Image (cartoon, rainbow, N blue to C red):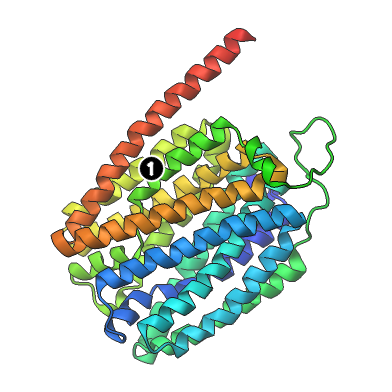
Amino acid sequence: MKKLLSSLPKSIWVISITGFLINMATIMVFSQMPIFMKTELGASEHTIGAIDGFVEFISHAMRIIAGSVSDIIQNRKVVLGVGYGLSAIVKPLFALTSSVGFVIVIRSLDRITNGLQASPRDALIGDLVPKTKRGSSYGLSKSLKTAGSVTGAAIVVWIMTISGNNFRLLFLCAFIPAIIALVLFIFGIKEPKAVPLKELTKPTKRRPFSWRSIFELKKDYWQVIGMLGIYELAHFGESYLTFRVREVGVDITYISIVMVLFNMGQFLSAFPIGALSDRFRRENILLLGFSFMLLANMFMIFGTSPLFVYLGVFLWGAQMGTTQSVFVSIVSEKAPKHVRGTAFGIFYIVMGIDILIASKCAGVLWDHFGSIGAFRYSAVVTCISIFVLLFWKHSQTKKTVSTSISC
C-alpha cells in the first residue's frame, strides 16, 4: 500500500490535499446547518430536506457546465481555480444569515462553487494517470476529501463546546482552510499540456471539443449512467441522518459525531476499495458498495439505540466511498479525453436530479410515516439497484466471453 501511494504523481497529491482543506471548510458549515436552520431560523425537517435536495441539484447542474467549459478551453485548472476562489469568499457569508431565504441564496452560491470543482477535478485526474492507477487515484482523492470532513467535524465539536454553541463564529472560522486550499492549488498544480496516459501506444493530437463529441460516448458509458440513475434514487440528503440520530436521544452538542462517522466510513473505504477496483472487475466492487447501502438502511430502520444508528451512519459513508470511487473510475475509462469533462458533467447532473427526487420523496415519507418510512424507501430502491447491477454484470461477462471466442 505504501509503494502504491508513493507511485502516484505529485499533482494527484496536491489535488487530494486541496480537497482535504475544501471539505474541512465545507463540513464546518454544513454539519451544523440543519440544526442552525431548525433552532435559530425555525425551519421544519421537510423544509430543510427540500433545501438540501434543491441546492445539491444546483451543484450537480453546474458540474455539466464546468466540465464542458474545461473541455472547450482545454484548461481544467482555470475552472477549478475559479471554483476554489468563490468557495473561500462564500464561507464567511453564512455568519450573516438571518432567514431561511438568505440561507437558500448563500447555500446555492456555495453549491455553485462546488459544481465548478467536481467535473474538472475528476477529468484532470483522469488526464494525469493511466488506467491501471485510476481507481487508486480517485480513491486517494476521495479518502483525503473525507479525511478533511472528519477533521472539520472534530473542529466543529471543539468550537461549539468552547463557544457555547456559537454557530456564527463557527461559520467565520470556515474561511481559513478554504483560503489555504486556494493558495495551495494555484501554486501547486500545473495544467498538463499533453495527456500522459501510458496505455496509449501511439502519439495522439489534442482534439478540439464540439458538442457533437458527446455522440462519441458509447453504449457502455450510457449503461453506467443508467445504473447510476437508478441507484442514486436511494440516496437522499445527509440531513436525514442527523435527524435520525436526534430521534434516539443524542445531544445537540455532539451531533457532529454523525458527520465524523459518515466521513470516516468514506475515508476508510475509498482508497483501498478504489485500489482493489484496479485489480479486480469494477462491477464486483460496485456490488459491495450497494450492499453497504442496504446494510446502512437496515441499521437505520431497526436501530433503537445510538450505537446501531451510528453504525448505519458509518455504513452510509462507506457506500459513498465505495460507489463513487468506482463509478468515477468507470466513467473516466468509458469517456474519450477530449470530452471527459462533459462526461463527468452528465454523470453529476444525473446524480443531482436523483438526489433532488430522493430528498423530496424522503421528506414526504418522513412527514407521513416517520423516519422509518424514508429509510424503507431507500432500502427498496437499493434492492432494485442490486438486481440491475447483477444483470449488467452478467451481460458484461457474456460480452467478454464472446469477444474472447471471436479472437
Q: Residue at x 47, y 33 (%)?
A: 283
**Residue at 61% from the left image edge and 62% from the top image edge:** 117
Q: Residues within 10 Å of mark 1 (few under 14, many from 20)?
A: some
The extreme front residue here reads 212
Where residue 221 sits, quadrant-wise, is top right
**To which quarter of the image does residue 89 belong?**
bottom right
Q: Relative to 163, say whether 260 is above or below.
A: above
Residue 243 is situated, as x and y percent measured from the top left of the image, at: 25, 68
Q: Provide the residue designation for mark 1.
A: 230
Question: The residue under label 1 is which amino acid type?
Answer: Ile
Relative image position of residue 193 (x, y in whole percent)? 83, 52
Residue at point 25%, 75% (across, down)? 44
Observer able to see residue 269: no
Q: Secondary structure at mark 1?
A: helix
Is residue 321 depicted above or below 89 in this figure? above
Total marks shown come to 1
